[in-house]
Image (tube, rainbow, N blue to C red):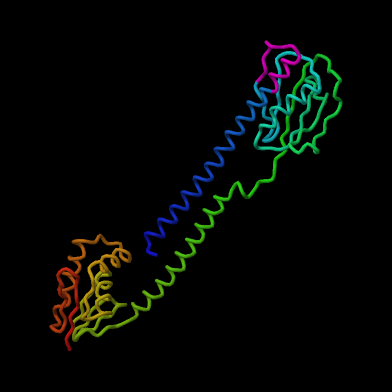
Amino acid sequence: MNRKCIFGLILFSLLFVFCTSFNATGSDAFDLAKREVLLRRIGHEVLLQSGDSTSRILPIEKISDHEYQIKFENTFTFKPEALVTISKRFLIKDVLSDEYLVNVLNCNNSSIVYGFTISKNKKDAQITCIGRKQPKACYTISVKFKTPPKSIGNYLYLWAGLCLLVCMGFIFSKRNKAKKAIVKEEYDKRFNIGLTVFDVQKRELQFHDATVDLTKTETRLLLIFASSPNAIIERSRLQKEIWEDEGVIVGRSLDMFISKLRKKLEQDSNISLVVVRGKGYKLEVTT
């Protein structure tokens, strides 16, 4: 797997994780906004049951992440059984929680006038004091939502993306270490090419008493040729390896590097770097 493929997979994994997280956050925000609409509907229905169709329901007050209060403009009376029925009808539509605690508070002293719990699992519900109509007064309805344990299924795609990202990072790291070990071994070598000694580590050519320095790219090129003397090296291989290892722009740049390297080798008549038309290049060595 080449570097471009690995980079592409890592980038895809990052985008995947980001989009999944963003989608989950966006979905929760929508459901929370929908929750406040349901609470207003409860307040509206409670006032209608008490015979009030004109007074306002004040803005829903968020006490904490999971607790809200419904406040009213005027005093009213309510029947507990009607409040239970109304709450069940609307709270069952809330997708973020399965259980709710509803308390009716006296505005003057915050004492609990009436309370009950609702659960989508009916046997866990607790409803008392049905049939006792409450006197007209200022009331606040408090609704507390039980937070369900987070299901790993909701984040399956997120975990999959993270695992893929970690795996790709591990593969890339392992491959990079192995490649560095191979490159180090190659760069410790010295090649006898004709009458010239090619010292890879020092990046130089030694011909009799003369020494010619090589650039990093020229060294990499000559290393490929010296490893396979008198063999045709395809142009596509040189382009790939030089691009991958050196980050050079290939095409005409490759011809330029070949030309410069040829000039540095021409002091040894036993060496010739030739073009094989339609195929690539060959380092011809005679002894």
- Residue 217 vertical position relative to residue 42 in the rendered view, above or below: below
The one of 96 and 190 positioned closer to us in this rendering: 96
Task: Name the spot of residue 53 as percent of width and height, x first.
Answer: 69, 11
- Residue 44 vertical position relative to residue 22 in the rendered view, above or below: above
**Figure quadrant of residue 112:** top right
Left or right of 286 in this view: 126: right
| Residue in view at x 73 percent, y 24 percent | 86
Task: Name the spot of residue 23 as percent of width and height, x first.
Answer: 53, 41
Left or right of 277 in this view: 87: right
Left or right of 238 in this view: 138: right
Check if residue 43 falls in the magenta segment.
yes
- Residue 198 vertical position relative to residue 73 in the rendered view, above or below: below
The one of 180 and 124 positioned closer to us in this rendering: 124
| Residue in view at x 25 percent, y 72 percent | 221
Q: Quadrant of the C terminus?
A: bottom left
| Residue in view at x 72 percent, y 15 percent | 48
Task: Name the spot of residue 129 as percent of width and height, x first.
Answer: 86, 25
- Residue 67 vertical position relative to residue 138 in the rendered view, above or below: below
Q: Which residues are magenta?
A: 42-58
**Figure quadrant of residue 232:** bottom left
The one of 112 and 268 positioned closer to us in this rendering: 112
**Figure quadrant of residue 230:** bottom left
Task: Name the spot of residue 128 as percent of width and height, x first.
Answer: 85, 28
Check if residue 97 falls in the magenta segment.
no
